[in-house]
Image: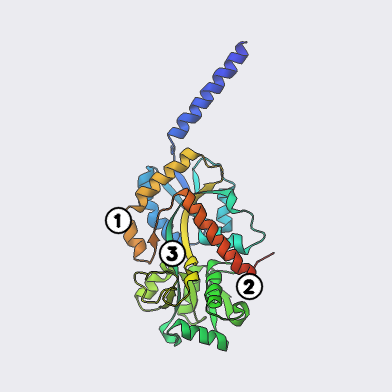
Amino acid sequence: MKLIKKTILGAFILGLSATVALAEYPERPISMVIPYGAGGATDISARSIAAPLGEAVGKPLIMANITGAGGATGSVTIQNAKPDGYKMLFARVGSHSVNPAMKATLPYTLDDFRFVTVYEINPVACAVTPASGIKSMSDLVAKAKEGGLSYSSSGVGSLLQLAAVMVLDEFGVEDPLNTVTHIPQKGGGAAATAVLNGTVNFLCTNSSAIAGFVANGQLVPLLVTTAQPVVGFDAPTSVDLGKPALQQLVGWTGIAGPDDLPDDVAKKWGTWMQAATSNAKFREIMESRGSVIELMNPIDANAFILQQYTTFRALVDKLGMRIEG
């Protein structure tokens, strides 16, 4: 009888301790995984929001770039993390929309994560150098149909590859996978550099990643994939050019944990992100790079991510881009 009483008492104390621990979350610093390298759109977004987010959290945020496999390596660390909220992911369009659509052997699915929010939308911009002689999308498409056109990306199966192919396909370039030469690079920064040094003719990438080059005249934008103009980008929108379907082609950044992240923890992240994205300095930095700050609740975020996946998967299947190995 004493043993039973001790067991019951112990279980009660353990349950009480767990409740108290959860109520006090976070008690220690939180590790934030950035699944892409320094200088890319994800890294820029993560490090820009780090200060206001850390202030809202009330504990230090330990930022770590865990790169590889188009964002999959860093994502797997969160898939396998303890669901206590002490290790979270800056989820990205490449890691959680493009990868699932492109790669048959990806070691995770969207269901392996709990998305607490999407907070940033990055329009995609296609750009060339002033020296290229290409001044419009009409020029780019004409050159593509003639042959000899090339583009860079952050890797095979990346958003940048998918973006270029989707744009060319939408503008009527037949078999864009073979008509235009893809020259993958090691990251988004390297992809932009390849255009700047003349290795390739163009790239289609997140506006935030090339805003600085556009501002100083090193790159000329030909198109932004939005209905409305993007600040700092003197280029027609996809709607202006009669290609409204390209509005689906945007980058995004969100926060995710393992799929069994507790409700209480997820709710706290919603509160923290509301405060962080309201920070005037953060908004100024990101909007100056062409980003749109739009805080989504978990339901809207999941619906948005699923819609993107569905759109990209349809294109991948249409053009035979699925990577099976």
The C terminus is located in which quarter? bottom right
Which residue bears the numbered disc 2? 319
* Kind of residue indicated by mark 1: Ala
Near mark 2 (Cα within 10 A), the count class, few <14, some 14-19 or many ≥20, is some
The N terminus is located in which quarter? top right
Residue 280: image tag: 1
Percent x, y of residue 199: 52, 81
Percent x, y of residue 49: 38, 54
* Kind of residue indicated by mark 3: Asn
Instruction: Please tell me in which quadrant of the rendered image residue 176 appears.
Output: bottom right
Instruction: Please tell me in which quadrant of the rendered image residue 123 appears.
Output: bottom left
Residue 87 in view (yes/no): yes
2, 312: nearer the viewer: 312
Task: Provide the secondary structure element on which disc 3 rests.
Answer: strand
Near mark 3 (Cα within 10 A), the count class, few <14, some 14-19 or many ≥20, is many
Distance of label 2 from label 3 (alpha carbons)? 24 Å
Which residue bears the numbered disc 3? 122
Upstream in sequence: badge 1 or badge 2: 1
Residue 33 in view (yes/no): no
